Amino acid sequence: MTAFSASRLVHRTGTSELDLWRRAVRAALKPSAPPLLSGLTPTSSSHPVPRFLRPQQGLHTLEEELDRLLATPRQELRADLEYVAQHRSLPGWARELADGDRGTAARLAQSIRDYHRIAVAPYWRGLASTIAADLAERARQLRNGGLEQVLSTLHPRMRWRPPHLEIDSPDDLDFHLGGRGLLLAPAAFMSYVPCDPDEERATEQPTLYYDVAGDGPPRALTTGLYGPHGGLAALLGHSRAAVLEVIAEGASTSQLARRVGLSIASASEHATVLRRVGLVTTHRTGRTRHHSLTPLGAELLLHAAASPLPDRH
């Protein structure tokens, strides 16, 4: 998500909320010292994003992701950067990164950390709850309408015409899965298809990162700044709305209490109320209770994310 947002930062298209996000982020970044991350991210969605910036298996925290980046073998970094360089120019320091220079890798990690703090972290709760709600909705679609319903509703610019999934793109390319399947990954800021028809990249799992908000994450970028969705907080109360948003990511009772800033007893009580009205489901693993959204809870979050925000004058 962080790499995709850095790419979106230079795009001029999208919603008014996305423009507000761009202005806020640019004002907070140091113009004299642009983040190293910007040198590796593409200026259009059709250019390749390095694989070490978009791992297919996500980890729980940014620090874990950065540790994995720093542990990437030199041969993988080199192969990835050489491939990207075939499609667009890279900054000079990318050569040092490809050579396995630890100092360059550490500076890149710090750049990502600093950029994430400004551009993503303040909006994370809204973005994460929107993505989690989308996942729950896709699971409901798969149960009720099968894969055809999922593929036909992924994105306004995507059309499912069996046996082809058509995606509007400036590049006229055909991607053949070759029996490897297609991994669907909800994303924010932009849709992206990293699988490439080149033979040497055929080992990469074909993946479609689809933008959960269509043309950029509109409400999530604003609601992340102000806490729970305004309408949701009016309906449930601020604490319970915050609990529902955190549960959208999946959480145990102790994790829920820590993330929302409640006692374990209060977090458990809120989760119980939400479970009784059919918004949350809970299962036990030993002594630990794990909470997740029901389809009704996911639908409520999705509708709240799409509803107009209250005036904040």
Image (tube, grey):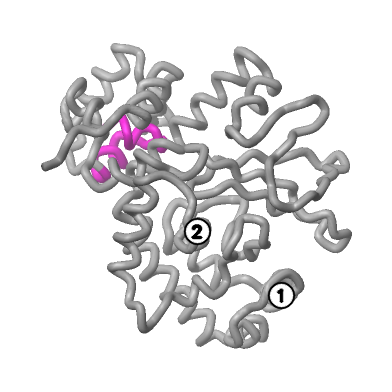
- Mark 2, residues whose alpha carbon is within 10 Å: few (<14), some, or many (≥20)? some
Q: Seen in the image, is 174 located left or right of residue 69?
A: right
Which quadrant of the rendered structure holds the C terminus? top left
Q: Amino acid at mark 1?
A: Ala
Circle 1 — which element?
helix
- Mark 1, residues whose alpha carbon is within 10 Å: few (<14), some, or many (≥20)? some
Residue pictured at 67% horizontal, 86% vertical: 99
Q: Amino acid at mark 2?
A: His
Circle 2 — which element?
loop
Q: Position of residue 95 (x, y in %)?
A: 65, 85
Q: Position of residue 201 (x, y in %)?
A: 81, 60
* Residue annotated with mark 1: 85
Q: Nearer the viewer, mark 1 or mark 2?
A: 2
* Residue annotated with mark 2: 11
**Placement of 47 over or under 233, stated as above or below:** below
Point out which mark residue 214 bears: none
Viewer-proximal residue among 182 and 161: 161
Give the residues drawn in magenta, as a range: 243-259
